[in-house]
Amino acid sequence: MVARGSRLALVALGLFAGAAGGVVAACATSGTGAGPQTGADAAEDGSIHPTDSSSGGGGCDGANLQTDFSNCGSCGHVCPTGQICNAGKCQQGCTPPQQLCPGQPGCYDLTSDEQNCGTCGTVCQAPEGTVIGSPVCNNGSCDFTCPTDAGTDSGAPIVKCGADAGTAGCFDLTTSPQNCGTCGMSCATGDTCTSGQCCTSGSIICGGACTNVQTSATNCGSCEAGCPAPAQCVAGQCTGYVVSNPTQAFINACTLPGSKAVLPNQTFFTTTPANNPIPIPFPFTFFGTAETEFWIGSQGVIGFGAQSKFEPPDSFPNCVPQGDPSTNFPAAVIFGDQDLATGGAGVCYATIGGVGDAGADAAVEAGADAGAGAQLVITWAGAYDQLDTGSLMTFSIVLTQGTNTIDFMYDVAAGPDGGLDTTVAGATATVGIQLPTSGSVEFAAVSCDTTFIPSTPYNVRFTPAQ
């Protein structure tokens, strides 16, 4: 138990624990601060520091030590006459345009103070981009200065955009997605700013317009880098084939050593067995994809790769000038006609060797290009159109190693009278090559239900664009 005298001593020291359990900082009553004091109790700044008071920080009998001039910063610290207590410091009152800012000692001009710009506590922050020096406060608004030319990669000058544009800062309007072409013009998410225009990803400005150089056939990979027709631009590179009509002697697989014949006398669309694909005897790419096997369809078509992609009644791609994405297999169609029937010789296929091989001389004599690699030849010998009684056609597809070219060779195209009529010239035939990809199609079309053979012999060559 504390003696009565001891309790009084604790009260005098301002350390008595009240009913709430908190420590109360009390100020002694011996000094009111109303009048000047002298002696040991006077501070150097003229304020009064009673020697018998505590400097508790929570308040002096409810006094606010931040603003109470009689207890400014500590209990009993009395500000001199004419001064005020601000943020626990005695100071002179502010003269307009300066004013007090709560919680900050001193006087502030809100029209020019970078820490209190326009309103107390508003600090001018450095905006985005390259800024000259520190931001300043002008007439109560934060301001900054941009270089006239920051030497950006585009060489374009830097432009100052204010907060009213959305994002304050210094920007190159030719490349900034937040301020593209003009302050406040923001590009959509994922788009880029190119030459001051918002363009989708992969696009650049060609001829004054956003151009996707990943897919543009006239600007493939870069502006004015065109792909030769009918090649296409895929992933910024020209893919597909250039079509030409070279003069070349006909090659008949049925007369070559080691020739094999399939599909004789077929009047409906028939293919070689799906469980017995025919290997391509040398490396060969079709639309840039390595192919190792093929299969033959009776109605003037070969398919590359697994025959599981073939889905009847898709005997060959539909006659669509831009290719047929509904046909699910890579195809080379030399004469796609639903009324085409094979003759007694059926469809022959054989391989002839390139330069340096034992069969080189025989290959050249058979019509192969001198200097070409090995060639795979597939020949429809003595085929006919069932609606053109008496017609006769013989033609070959030739795949060449190394160059990856595809040749369509037409040796015989005769109507009933032995001459060239519209049917055997292609009036009802699909002719070309295509590769379906993800619902679209890469293609190189020659003819779509139009006559295309002017006379025989006639050759069509597909040369890869790259």
Image (spheres, rainbow, N blue to C red):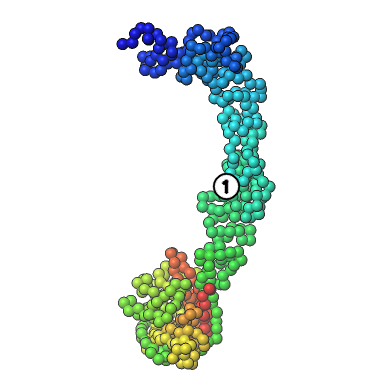
Quadrant of the image occupied by residue 120: top right
Q: In this view, does 372 lie above or below 2?
A: below
Q: In this view, does 161 lie above or below 15?
A: below
Task: Out of 340 and 99, give the one closest to the viewer.
Answer: 99
Q: Which residue is drawn at 53% across and 69% down?
A: 238
Q: How many marks?
A: 1
Q: Is residue 398 above or below residue 138?
A: below
Task: Out of 389 and 2, give the one closest to the viewer.
Answer: 2
Question: Does residue 221 show up?
Answer: yes
Instruction: Name the side, left or right, on which 150 lies relative to 187.
Output: right
Q: Which residue is drawn at 65% across and 49% down?
A: 150
Is label 1 in a helix, a strand or a loop? loop
Instruction: Residue 264 in the image: state x and y as whole percent.
Output: 36, 86
Q: Which residue is drawn at 64% across and 36% down?
A: 136
Q: Residue furthest front?
A: 40
Instruction: Residue 100 in the image: state x and y as whole percent.
Output: 60, 23
The residue singled out by tag 1 in the image is 178
Question: Does residue 384 show up?
Answer: no
Instruction: Residue 160 in the image: state x and y as whole percent.
Output: 64, 44
Instruction: Residue 78 in the image: state x and y as whole percent.
Output: 55, 14
Q: How crowded is mark 1: few (under 14 residues within 10 Å), some or many (20 or more)?
A: many
Type of the residue with mark 1: Gln
Quadrant of the image occupied by residue 350: bottom left
Task: Out of 408 and 54, give the one closest to the viewer.
Answer: 54
Q: Which quadrant of the rendered structure holds the N terminus?
A: top left
Q: Which residue is drawn at 63% across and 53% down?
A: 152
Q: Which residue lies furthest to the right in this view?
A: 148
